[in-house]
């Protein structure tokens, strides 16, 4: 009877657009205040909507829905004509503000999380690279130690870890140290499946794709092809076996050529594969943004691949034990090898909008809903649907962040 009564109250609340939400717990009814975001262009998965208010509950940390009107006594946030969009989800980021995930420092992870919240990121996968195995384990433990805490701190939430390597091809190692490359080992990954959410593997280094197959069969981990020189046929086979994502498309992988389409061709051709790319206008030509997005649709993901030099002035920094040099938007090793980026995820959205004719909602999806879907959290993250986590950003026309809300709590205001 109580559940039926509460449901009736909820429906009445929605119908009358009153500023209360009703919840129940162990036989008791609670009235929870709603906060309304008004005067914004609300970015939904399939459209951008104006003339409505987006409501969320600070107490429950959930989105309540869209409303046509707002009560006179309601708590409001004025978007002042800006975009009201889902919090951004970065599934590939190594560091920021002088911190690196492989430092294995919980306070460093917190600094990264707080820093990227100012860029509209409400959840992320701190990303390791091909360092010594003990260092990877230490980094996993550091992320593990603060993952639960990250749900309530005033920074982006840690959803897990992306392990970029160490199971990669030396010929496509990029800025990763060859001496730390290992043979693919599914058991090591599965032992850490509580924290590893995504892993990058070169499929040609995985005999008979044994590691890929075992991870696909025994976990929900996103297996991604990257730092790989696989031929087209092997890449297509790896996708079939469970490697259903491509790490920083075009970079550190066999290229698209008309007689050997490579990993790039396989990732673009397969309906089962999602792809991520770095839209900093440097890693790949902006002319490719639209081509990739129109081929891959909802399986297109924007990432930063940001390193510790992100948010810092030009100069010398460190990545995986090697010196890197930042000049403008370019990070390189001493020999000129590209070494990650200093991209902010909101700027990736801005860059794609500036260089394509894609709809605003499609581009925001690429940095929110699409990555959330790739790592299997789109049931609670990535879009502004009722019942999902109230992870919300407000931006200006240039996609600069005005406000970041995580779980119903404002964690940044410009």
Image: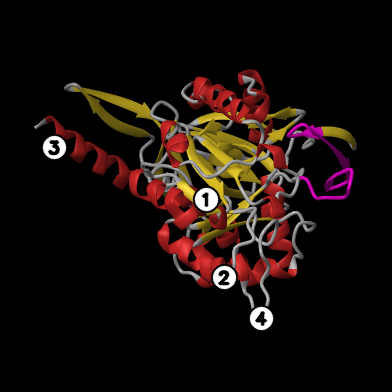
Horizontally, residue 64 falls left or right of residue 179, namely left
Q: Around disc 1, counting alpha carbons within 10 Å, would you say few (fewer than 14), some (14 to 19), or many (20 or more)?
A: many
Mark-to-mark CA distance, 1 and 2: 24 Å
- The residue wearing badge 3 is 4
Q: Considering the image in quadrants, where does the C terminus appear?
A: top right
**Can you say whether 157 is above or below 250 in the image?**
above
**In this rendering, which labeled residue sits more in front, label 1 or label 4?**
4
Q: CA distance from mark 2 to mark 4?
A: 11 Å
Residue at image mark 4: 258
Q: What residue is drawn where x is 65% and y is 46%? A: 395
Q: Nearer the viewer, mark 2 or mark 3?
A: 2
Residue 273: horizontal and vertical position, in percent? 49, 62
Separation (CA) of disc 4 from disc 3: 62 Å
Q: Quadrant of residue 253?
A: bottom right
Q: Does 334 appear in magenta?
A: yes
User: In the image, 98: left or right of 113?
Assistant: right
Could you tell me how far apart the alpha carbons at marks 1 and 4 are, in whole angstroms?
29 Å
Visible in this render: residue 390?
A: no
How many callouts does the rendering have? 4
Packing grade of label 2 (10 A; few <14, some 14-19, many >=20) is many
Q: Nearer the viewer, residue 406 or 295?
A: 295
Crowd tier of the residue under label 3, counting other residues whose Cα lies within 10 Å: few below 14, some 14–19, many 20 or above: few
Look at 84% across and 46% down and name the residue there: 332
Determine which residue is flagged by label 1.
371
Against 83, residue 2 (above or below) is above
**Residues shaded magenta:** 318-339
Q: Which residue is mark 2?
A: 232
Drawn side of residue 380 relative to residue 363, left or right: left
């Amino acid at each position: 009877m109580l559940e039926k009564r509460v449901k009736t109250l909820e429906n009445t609340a929605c119908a009358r657009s009153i500023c209360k939400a009703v919840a129940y717990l162990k036989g008791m009814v609670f009235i929870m205040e709603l906060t309304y975001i008004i005067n914004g262009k609300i970015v939904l998965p399939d459209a951008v909507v104006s003339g409505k208010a987006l409501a969320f509950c600070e107490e429950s940390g959930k989105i309540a829905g869209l409303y046509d009107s707002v009560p006179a006594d309601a708590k409001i946030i004025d978007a002042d004509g800006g975009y009201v969009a889902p919090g951004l989800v970065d599934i590939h980021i190594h560091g920021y503000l002088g911190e690196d995930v492989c430092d294995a420092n919980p306070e460093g992870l917190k600094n990264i999380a707080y820093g990227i919240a100012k860029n509209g990121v409400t959840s992320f996968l701190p990303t390791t690279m091909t360092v010594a195995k003990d260092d990877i384990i230490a980094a996993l433990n550091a992320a593990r130690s603060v993952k639960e805490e990250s749900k309530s701190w005033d920074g982006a939430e840690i959803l897990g870890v992306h392990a970029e390597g160490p199971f990669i091809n030396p010929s496509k190692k990029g800025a990763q140290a060859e001496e730390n490359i290992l043979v693919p080992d599914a058991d090591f990954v599965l032992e850490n499946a509580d924290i590893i959410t995504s892993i990058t593997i070169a499929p040609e280094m995985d005999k008979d794709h044994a590691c890929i197959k075992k991870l696909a069969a025994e976990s929900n981990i996103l297996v991604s092809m990257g730092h790989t020189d696989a031929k087209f046929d092997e890449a297509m086979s790896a996708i079939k076996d469970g490697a259903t994502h491509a790490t920083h498309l075009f970079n550190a992988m066999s290229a698209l050529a008309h007689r050997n389409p490579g990993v790039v061709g396989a990732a673009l051709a397969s309906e089962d594969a999602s792809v991520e790319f770095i839209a900093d206008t440097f890693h790949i030509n902006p002319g490719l943004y639209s081509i990739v997005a129109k081929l891959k649709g909802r399986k297109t993901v924007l990432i930063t691949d940001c390193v510790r030099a992100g948010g810092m002035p030009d100069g010398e920094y460190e990545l995986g034990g090697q010196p890197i040099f930042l000049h403008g938007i370019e990070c390189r090793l001493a020999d000129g090898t590209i070494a990650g980026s200093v991209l902010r995820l909101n700027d990736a959205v801005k860059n794609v909008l500036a260089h394509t004719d894609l709809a605003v909602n499609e581009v925001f999806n690429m940095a929110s809903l699409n990555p959330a879907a790739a790592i299997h959290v789109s049931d609670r993250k990535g879009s502004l649907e009722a019942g999902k986590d109230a992870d919300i950003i407000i931006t200006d026309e240039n996609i600069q962040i005005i406000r970041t809300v995580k779980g119903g709590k404002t964690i940044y205001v410009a």
